[in-house]
Image (cartoon, rainbow, N blue to C red):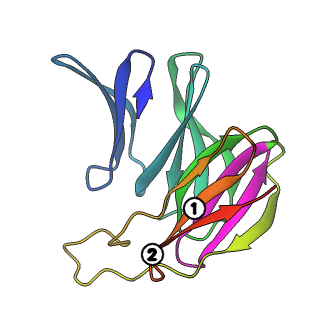
Amino acid sequence: MRFDDALAVSEHANHRVISIKGDVTRVLADGLGEPTGLAVSGRDLFVCDRANGRLLKIVANGVPVSPPTVVARGLEAPEGIAVVADGFAVVEAERGRVVLVGKDGSITPLADTGPGSPAASAAQPPSMVFNGIAAGPDGALYATGEHTRALYRIAR
C-alpha cells in the first residue's frame, strides 16, 4: 500500500510492517502477531493483527508508534480494513462478517460475507486467501467473499 512516498508492506510471517522506498527498507512496526490489512489516513498507518484480534495504529503523523496504539480489540481474525468517515470498516475473516470499528473502538456488525477457510498446513498463513475491503466514493463498501467468490457491495 502506498504510504508517505513509499510502499508499506505487512510481512505476515516476519510479524512486522515495513516501508520500502527505492533500496531503503524501514521497519515501521515489529513483534506483531499476524499483521494483515493496512489502511492509511493522512500520515497515519493502521494494521490489523489477525492473531490477536486487534486494530492497531502503528504510525502517527509519519512517525512509528512504539508500542502501537490499540484502536480496537476483540475482533475475530481481522484482515481487510478500510478507512471510512466514522471509523474503519474491517473484515473479520473467521466469522465472515464486516464490522464498523468506531472512532471510540466500538464494534458494530454491518454485513455477513461468509467465513474464510482454514490453512491447509502449518506452513501457510491462517487465511489462505486474503479477505479485503475497500470504500467507494459514495460511501459504499466493497468486500470479498472467499467461499462464494463474490464481491459484495454494502450500502451505508
Q: Amino acid at mark 2?
A: Glu
Q: Quarter of the image holding residue 18?
A: top left
Front position in the image: 124 or 16: 124
Q: Position of residue 115 (x, y in %)?
A: 53, 81
- Could you tell me which secondary element the residue under label 2 belongs to? loop
Residue 21, position as x, y percentages in the image? 26, 18
Residue name at image x 39 percent, y 15 percent: 5
Q: Is residue 53 shown to the viewer in this render?
A: no
Mark 1 is surrounded, within 10 Å at the Cα level, by few (under 14), some (14 to 19) or many (20 or more) other residues, namely many
In the drawing, does residue 62 fall left or right of residue 119?
right
Taking the spot 38% from the left edge, 83% from the top edge, the residue there is 118
Looking at the image, residue 108 lies above or below residue 146: above
Considering the whole magenta stretch, tell me its main secondary structure.
Answer: strand
Q: Is residue 2 above or below residue 117?
A: above
User: Can you identify the residue that label 1 sits on?
Assistant: 143
Q: In the rendered structure, does residue 91 fall within the stretch colored magenta?
A: yes
Observer-nearest residue: 110 or 18? 110
- Toward the left, the furthest residue is 23
Please provide percent x and percent y for residue 101: 75, 53
**Mark-to-mark CA distance, 1 and 2:** 10 Å
Query: Which labelled disc corresponds to residue 146?
Result: 2
| In magenta stretch: residue 137 | no
Is residue 86 in view from this perspective? yes
Q: Secondary structure at mark 1?
A: strand
Quadrant holding the N terminus: top left
Quadrant including the C terminus:
bottom right
Q: Tell me where the magenta segment starts and ends, as one range.
A: 87-102
